[in-house]
Structure formats: structure tokens, C-alpha cells
Image (spheres, rainbow, N blue to C red):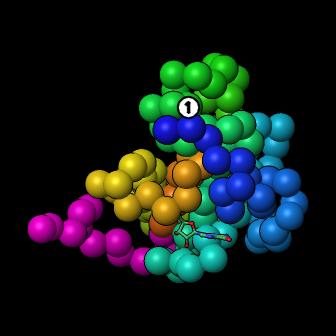
Amino acid sequence: MAYDRDNIFARILRDEIPCDKVFEDDHVLAFHDINPQAPTHVLVIPKGEYVSMDDFTANASDVEVAALFRAVGAVARELGLAGSGYRILANHGPDSHQEVPHLHVHIFGGRPLGPMLIRG
Ligand code: 5GP
């Protein structure tokens, strides 16, 4: 899938749309989801133009890949989720209901999250 430079997260990265930032470094931005599905719901995104985890891990540098995963852990710690627990999730493609075609890792926490997937 070709990268769409007008997707909403590309626009957030260009500061065209505001976000409620929780973490930023040279390679990663993390911000609260606009429609939270849990008391804590944060999105962690690479700054590079990657659609999905398979695109990212095939084409990003080792530094970018490490930065994304270190940021996920750092955000979980900084938001106080490491003790109570949290879930990470990254959707890609139609079967997953991916809405925004820029790789993002969801972090959910702050309440018991129930079973992993809705059946059916
Ligand atoms: P997906 O379904 O692609 O895995 O998740 C996309 C997520 O992006 C959804 O949880 C949705 O609420 C969130 N989202 C969509 N537009 C915006 C926005 O403009 N700002 C923020 N902070 N989150 C957004």
C-alpha cells in the first residue's frame, strides 16, 4: 500500500492538526487517542512514512525500529501502567479495521481489558 501523505497522523506530524502529546523524540511521537477506548489510550507512531508493521520492519532503520519499541515501553512506564498492566495493538489492513494508514501502536490501560479479541 502506498503511503498517503494526507493521512491524519501525517498531518499531526506536520503540526497541521493538534494532538495531546505524551512523548516525542527524533523518531517517535506518542499522543492520546481522540476517541479513547480505555481510561488510558495512547497512540505511538514513527515519524517516518510507514503504513504498517510489516512495511516498517522491512524498510525502517534499526534505529527507528528500536526507537518505536523503546517509546512504547517508556510511555507505559511513564503513564503508570507497568504495574496494573496494559495491552498493545497495531492494526493493518481491512481485516483489522485499520482507519489511519500510518503505522500506530495503541496502548490501552487503566482498567481490566477483558478478553483479547471479540469473537465472531
Ligand atoms: P486504527 O483503527 O487505525 O487502528 O486506529 C486509529 C485511531 O486513531 C482510532 O482509535 C481513532 O480514535 C484515532 N484517531 C483518529 N483521528 C484522530 C485524531 O485526529 N487525533 C487523535 N489523537 N486520534 C485520532
- Does residue 114 show up magenta in the picture? yes
**Amino acid at circle 1:** Phe
User: Which quadrant of the figure contains the C terminus?
Assistant: bottom left
- Asked if residue 11 lies left or right of residue 98, the reply is right
Report helix, strand or loop for mark 1.
helix
Q: Residue furthest right?
A: 15
Structural crowding at the residue carrying mark 1, measured as other residues with C-alpha within 10 Å and reported as few (<14), some (14–19) or many (≥20): some
Answer above or below: position of 30 versus 59. Answer: below
Q: Residue furthest left?
A: 120
Circle 1 residue: 56
Q: Give whichever of 45, 72 is nearer the camera.
A: 45
Find residue 94 and report its horizontal and vertical position in percent.
Answer: 35, 54
Residue occupying the point 56% across, 79% down: 35
Residue occupying the point 66% across, 57% down: 7
Highlighted range, magenta: 109-120
| Residue 102 visible (yes or no) | yes
Q: Give whichever of 81, 65 is nearer the camera.
A: 65
Looking at the rendering, which quadrant does residue 46 occupy?
top right
Residue occupying the point 56% across, 38% down: 2
| Residue 78 visible (yes or no) | no
Answer above or below: position of 26 versus 86. Answer: above
- Does residue 41 show up magenta in the picture? no
The prevailing secondary structure element of the residues shown in magenta is loop
- Asked if residue 18 lies left or right of residue 29, the reply is right
Find residue 36 and report its horizontal and vertical position in percent.
Answer: 54, 78
User: Is disc 1's CB within 8 Å of ligand 1?
Assistant: no
Looking at the rendering, which quadrant does residue 31 occupy?
bottom right
- Asked if residue 5 lies left or right of residue 92, the reply is right
Residue occupying the point 42% across, 48% down: 92
